[in-house]
Amino acid sequence: MKKHSKHPTLNRFIGYSRGLKGFFLLAVLTTGASILFNFLTPQIIRITVDSVIGQEPFALPDYAMSLLESFGGREFLRKSLWVCGGAVLICTVAQGLCNLAARLLISHSTETYIKRLRDDIFRHIQHLPFSWHTHNRTGDIIQRCTSDMDVIRNFVANQLLEVIRIVTLIVTALFLMSQMHLGLTCVALVFIPIVACYSGFFFSRISKQFRFADEAEGDLMVNIQENLTGVRVVRAFGRERGELDKFDAQSQVLYDRWVNLGYTLGAYWGMGDLVTGIQVLTVILVGCWLAFNGQLTLGEFLAFVSYNRTLAFPLRRLGRILSDVSKTRVSAERLSEVLEAEEEHDAVTDTEPDMRGDIVFDRVSFAYDGETVLKDVSFEIPAGSTFGILGNTGSGKSTLCYLLDRLYDVESENGCITIGGVDIRTIRRNYLRQNVGLVLQEPFLFSKTIAENIAISRSDASMEDIRRSASIADVDESIMEFSKGYDTIVGERGVTLSGGQKQRVAIARTLMCGSPIMVFDDSLSAVDLTTDARIRDALRSGTDGATVILISHRINTLMDADRILVLDNGRAAEYGTHEELLALGGIYKRTYDLQSAAASGKEEA
Amino acid sequence: MSENINYAKGFRPKTWAKLFPFLKAYAGRLIFIMVLMSLTAIIDVIIPRFQSYAVDHFIVPGTLEGIKPFAIAYICAILFSSVCTILFSRQSMVVEMGLGRDMRRACFVHLQELSLTYFNQTAVGYILARVMSDTNRIAGLIAWSLEDIFWSLAYVTAAFVSMFSVNARLALIILAVVPPIAIVTGFFQGKILAANRHIRSVNSKMTGAYNEGITGAKTSKTLVIEDRISDEFSEITDELYRANYCSAKLNAVFIPIITFFSSTAVAFVLMQGGYMVMDQVIEFGTLSMFVSYALNILEPIRTTARVFSECISAQVNIERVSALLEHPCLIQDTPEVIEKYGDTFNPKRENWEPIKGHIEFKDVTFKYPDGDEYILEHFNLDIPAGTNVAIVGETGAGKSTLVNLACRFFEPTSGSILIDGVDYRQRSQLWLHSSLGYVLQSPQLFSGTVAENIRYSKPDATDEEVRAAAKMVSADVVAEKLEKGYDTDVGEGGDRLSTGEKQLISFARAILADPPIFVLDEATSSIDTETELLIQNAIQHILKGRTSFMIAHRLSTVRHADIILVVEDGRIIERGSHSELLELNGKYAELYKAMEIREKHQKMGGIALE
């Protein structure tokens, strides 16, 4: 995946926020309001202490003063201190309501935003071409979709608002403080760069150590997992002692790394306590001196100290947020790389022709990243016939089916594939794939019930249809043996099917499409010969008139086919019926002899 | 299984008592941490008094006299508190990691001794979660949260002592808001924890869906169901949205409520204290100190309530870990045996008798601990040293039972199994296991190089021995094909190799130890023709001159076995040599003939398949 500049990334991520900007703006406003109310409380306390209880003049705007006077001024308040207390409470309630609104707004907009992003990336991945899936490791993509997505979510949900909150907080606090005393504010400010510097320093260190410790945890996890899955091997070789020693060694590495991290954290926290403590002390000392010189009232002093304290915590957070921002940028870029990969596109001129014609490969060559797998292959499959392809691992037989299903496209100068005379590169992909039922070599079943898996391409299928397909694939009986029958859940969260059962369910699933062309890419490798033969018989009678292409390295699977193609190293080496190919005495004959020898020598003697 | 864990609410001291054995080693450190926390709490309580001292002694009287000792005392307090923080975080991390390590080790050791039934019934992911996440959670809670509680309690106590010593009336006002804050926090915290659990479970559902969507993308494409799968995914993200929003709602309501209570305290202190200042009962500094306490008391109360509800929910983790630790080992060596031969981790090899490989089942009756049907009843079988025993039957017919018994992965319910004439329960498990060669149906390798994997059965083997073993079973072909030969990393569980390659390496591993007894769980499906031939050759080599058990669902090599056992529905229905069984004309003969017919069909070109 190639790197891109930052701006398209940023624009892409902003693009997902359509219709949410209003909510977000409102969240920012309510947060701001809640901060303002938060700051009002110390002011009320200051006024109460200074001007109500004490004798200082009210330093209030005129309209507030006249309002106050109409109630009876200072004397009234001195008698009814509950008004001041009530004002504190009102402020709290107002602040609480703003806070509540802000949290709900931000949660709604963030979660909606992230949901859109998740849905979109999922849909996008589904529509990415086959080659993309082959080139990228599953684990890596999943990590991008989960861990990197979480980093972004965390940033949008917490950090973004936090940055706004902290900046507002600091600016407001500084403004109010500077109103009271500019010099003292400067004293308080001196510490900001110090805090920011050491926080940044520690955070980069801590996150490095954290990753390091995390790796040790991963290693230990793998170790335990292998010990558990290989428990029979461990027992059978009496290797418990060795396993325990290995475990102890890795466990100690984990311990050491975390304890080291603990030391760094301790230093960081201790440093934080020290710096903020000294800052508060400095402000108090300077404040005392200023008050002594008559530049600061008692109430101002109290309010100032209290604002100063609200500064300490957000400042410590700021260092952390700075290091998170860079993390978020990396994650956003990693996600962008996935999002920018190009999806498959059909040309507007693409058609949906009749698919019941002959299939013709005409001088087809194909290469993956410069590595040639098919060289000048030509053959013809008459509509409705059964066609076999034999070849060893790496002979290019799977590539043939990928090309026929347009999972990959043949370059225009490298020959062409036609169905009923129509070049498949001009057929709409989804239409083509619906009409070419391809059973992959390693079929994937979803974590659903067996019935849902079989009917996955046709949500309207009846139970009879499902069972009919399953019967053709010779898996109906095995399914009925499960206690929940067709409602048995398979895959990661359910029953593990054997390789043969999986292949047969996959065949049943493809049969449900009712495609006129069916391709079985080594889909019978894990079933025994008798079952293999039974399935092929059922296929012949159950798929009225469909063209069937069987691919295998097993002669038994192919020998009944009307025509057999032998692929060798990407070339069409031999072509004909079973008898013709045996008479030819080439690769087909050799493979046949080898397999019969293996069968008679080992299986039977 | 013992996993019916009681999720009932409430504090259960019995559960916590289970942690004592682990806590003992850290008692000193825990006490040290608690002392540190109390000191920190006291400093935290004292610091607002510095401020009120400054107000009363410098600002109100308008003097700077005595400010130097004041500043020095303040700095000392700050330094002291910083040092406490540094020490406390180090100690806490040591306790957390140490406790986690010890609990994990205890689990791991116990897992090495648990019977295989446990592993057959329990998913690896499930065990892994016990060993990693649950222990982590408990250790983290003990190391950090209990200290939080200690700090909070010390802070609250010290604060009230300080407040009551100055003015009881104002102190009472603040005390009055403690219970509502604690109750409200307790109430919400429970709900928030539950909501977060829900989020986590939906989240893991989503990760699963990603996993499936990406792993299955090729399949979705061939079936043209991309949109359908995406729509289903969208339903999960909808659920996740609701779960997250619900949790946000709880937080949004909870925080303003408790802030309101603490503000009430501030308001009342301001009112009452204000009158008191006017009546000259207290000084300005005292009022500011109380306002400060009223604002600060919120945090420790919240912490206490939060930690308490975390402790309640962590009881589940403790119960899960102790359920694992208390799971009984079904097969244990007697104390006398351990005395003589050593235990699993400290064997006394010098006392071990060499094994010749004569195995005798004597009047053995057996049922699986989790089954209720007797699989063997009064079963007798004599296997002289060097005999090849084959066990045939259909998939799932219970072919492994005899092997499990012979290897002492399970013990007979009654009767006995003699090895070289002695009941194997009079020897240690390790004694027998160290003499086994075992090749599984699905070969299991470990992370590491090819050589390390082969050497697994005999850690002190030289490179030459490793190579010789590999050569004997044609695994050298596999190793030489790899980029770094024997030093190639095979990946997690050997994932970088094909099944056939893994199988050949597992053969080499088994043969390196030169064991007198060999077990082969047949393994040749979906392997291409060439590899299959290699494996068949390897088997011939391995079986020569050893007592062996071969489990087979095909009849390959079975013919030459000295004894063939035919298993159906978990029972042995026929036994004898190939020719004896053919003569018997029972199940074996039937299976054999079926294969013969298939064989002929193949030869004739499959014409007679119908």
Image: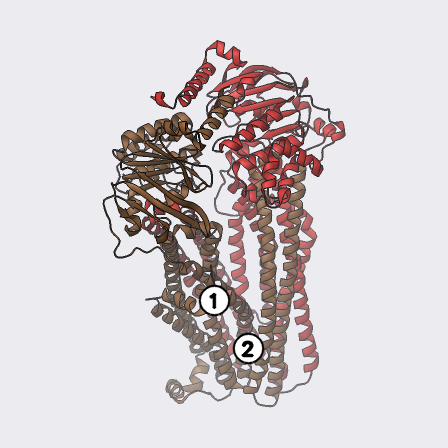
Chain colours: A brown, B red
Question: Is residue B169 visible in this depiction of the protein?
Answer: no
Per the image, label 2 sits on a secondary structure element best described as helix
Q: Is residue B589 above or below residue A165?
A: above
Front residue (pair B324, B182): B324
Q: Amino acid at mark 2?
A: Asn
Front residue (pair A273, B52): A273
Q: Position of residue B549 (x, y in %)?
A: 58, 23
Q: Position of residue A131 (x, y in %)?
A: 41, 51
Mark 2 = which residue? A308
Per the image, label 1 sits on a secondary structure element best described as helix
> On the rendered image, what quadrant is the C terminus of chain B found in?
top left
> Residue A447 falls in which quadrant of the image?
top left
Question: Is residue B191 visible in this depiction of the protein?
Answer: yes
Front residue (pair B315, A203): A203
Q: Amino acid at mark 1?
A: Gln
Chain designation of label 2: A
Mark 1 = which residue? A159
Relative placement, left or right, of A91 versus B94 is left
